[in-house]
Image (tube, helix red, strand yellow):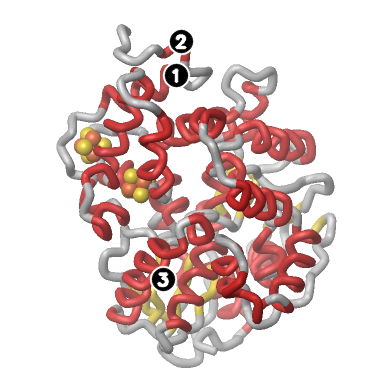
């Protein structure tokens, strides 16, 4: 196929980037689904506008630097992919474009320091825990600190839950029906270690043995979405080596990690590990995606409860998983799943977006929180730690806190007869 942009000169993902650009027919159906367009009302802050900008830069008719403010404001939420009738795979353009642009851009000293801090702490639970403890002590200095540190501190909970060690193997209860390997995650292990504990209990209860491979680490999504494909590959490589092949699935309970690992084929395109990475990606399942094939059969809640299910973008838009979590939650007698108005819009978390674009993230987050309150729900469930932290912080800022749990924690509490509404 004859491409308009110089495919051979723009790196190993050139063909996918060109394909995404050429598929776009400029219809604009994606515009109402785009949180930045809905908030800012600017064409260049819409998917269509960004595709045009990236195309122009790749063709050489504008310089990359001039596209960056608009590309940086993109949440990478992929709501435009779900909305697009032409099947434009926007992520296959955005992710390599960011990696390419990162090499050309100039960043201020403060930006470099802040980014280095994020990149050197968040992917490693022990470092992140130490940084979070130091961050709480530094809270009174918040107004004096450079961006994005105040935004980071604002998202930290008032106290950190104690670390919870994970066993090497968590056996199935009763007859073993399946055996899976769990990605333990990074940020989540510090901010909400209970999610992994709930995952182990719920999987075991359904006859699923879980191994937690030693030597695993961050999935690399954080680096990839920040445009550092090499650092992402280094992290991903450790997981390619650490995870066993003799399991039925590689399970993740964080939507951002799941979508990142399902993209390992794209990440390793042209690298010696490409085939291995594609095979790995093919075995990755979100915990709800895997569990929905089992007869979960939870007991009824002691009292009726209205629970809003929030579609994490990296679950709904990036992985197309919307039914499985609703089916699992809907299986709990006495629990009614309510829909959130404008549910397709991102909550503003989007990896480190709420750290890098705190004002816009706060506006997008406030819209989500208002929509949740409008649903009349007594509690909220979501399948991604970033969304959980962002929604909790936004509801608290509005003075309307609600319990917000991971989907798997809701199931776990139902099994254990523990209250969901707090
Ligand atoms: S909906 Fe798809 S084809 Fe239409 S403008 Fe958006 S990305 Fe392009
Ligand atoms: S990924 Fe999200 S923020 Fe970015 S253009 Fe698409 S809908 Fe808009």
Which mark is nearer the camera, 3 or 2? 2
Question: Residue at image x 56%, y 47%?
Answer: 258
Closest to the observer, 121 or 236: 121
Question: Residue at image x 41%, y 66%?
Answer: 310
Q: Is residue 258 left or right of residue 326?
A: right
Marks 2 & 1, CB-CB < 8 Å contact: yes
Q: Is residue 180 visible from the viewing direction of this image?
A: no
Residue 321: mark in rendering: none
**Among the 4 quarters of the image, the one containing residue 4:** top left
Question: Residue 144 location in percent, x, y?
Answer: 61, 71
Label 2 sits on a secondary structure element that is: helix
Q: Is residue 393 left or right of residue 184?
A: left
Label 1 sits on a secondary structure element that is: helix
Residue 378 in the image: above or below residue 219:
below
Residue 8: mark in rendering: 2
Residue 43 in the image: above or below residue 62:
below
Q: Is residue 403 left or right of residue 129?
A: left
Closest to the observer, 267 or 276: 267
Q: Which residue is mark 1?
A: 14
Question: Residue at image x 75%, y 54%?
Answer: 124
Q: Which residue is mark 3?
A: 330
């Amino acid at each position: 196929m004859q491409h308009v942009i110089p495919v051979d000169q723009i790196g190993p993902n050139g063909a996918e980037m060109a394909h995404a650009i050429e598929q776009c027919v400029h219809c604009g159906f994606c515009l109402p689904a785009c949180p930045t367009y809905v908030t800012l009302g600017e064409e260049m802050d819409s998917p269509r506008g960004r595709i045009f900008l990236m195309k122009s830069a790749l063709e050489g008719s504008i310089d990359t630097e001039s596209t960056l403010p608009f590309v940086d404001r993109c949440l990478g939420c992929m709501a435009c992919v779900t909305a697009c009738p032409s099947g434009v795979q926007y992520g296959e353009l955005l992710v390599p474009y960011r990696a390419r642009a990162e090499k050309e851009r100039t960043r201020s000293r403060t930006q470099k320091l802040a980014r280095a801090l994020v990149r050197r702490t968040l992917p490693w639970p022990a470092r992140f825990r130490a940084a979070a403890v130091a961050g709480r002590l530094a809270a009174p200095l918040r107004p004096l600190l450079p961006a994005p540190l105040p935004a980071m501190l604002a998202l930290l909970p008032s106290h950190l839950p104690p670390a919870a060690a994970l066993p090497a193997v968590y056996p199935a209860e009763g007859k073993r029906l399946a055996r899976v390997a769990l990605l333990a995650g990074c940020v989540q292990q510090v901010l909400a270690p209970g999610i992994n504990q709930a995952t182990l209990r719920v999987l075991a209860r359904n006859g699923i043995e879980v191994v937690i491979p030693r030597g695993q680490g961050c999935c690399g999504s954080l680096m990839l979405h920040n445009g550092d494909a090499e650092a992402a590959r280094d992290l991903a490589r450790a997981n390619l080596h650490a995870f066993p092949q003799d399991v039925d699935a590689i399970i993740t309970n964080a939507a951002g990690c799941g979508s990142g690992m399902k993209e390992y084929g794209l990440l390793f395109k042209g690298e010696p590990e490409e085939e291995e990475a594609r095979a790995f990606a093919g075995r990755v399942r979100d915990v709800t995606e895997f569990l929905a094939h089992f007869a979960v059969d939870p007991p009824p809640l002691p009292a009726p409860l209205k629970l809003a299910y929030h579609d994490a973008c990296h679950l709904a838009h990036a992985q197309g998983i919307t039914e499985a979590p609703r089916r699992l939650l809907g299986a709990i007698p006495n629990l009614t799943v309510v829909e959130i108005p404008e549910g397709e819009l991102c909550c503003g978390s989007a990896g480190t977006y709420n750290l890098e674009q705190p004002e816009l993230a706060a506006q997008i987050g406030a819209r989500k929180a208002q929509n949740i309150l409008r649903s009349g729900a007594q509690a909220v469930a979501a399948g991604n730690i970033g969304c959980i932290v962002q929604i909790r912080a936004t509801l608290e800022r509005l003075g309307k806190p609600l319990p917000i749990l991971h989907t798997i924690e809701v199931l776990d509490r139902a099994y254990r007869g523990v209250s969901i509404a707090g």
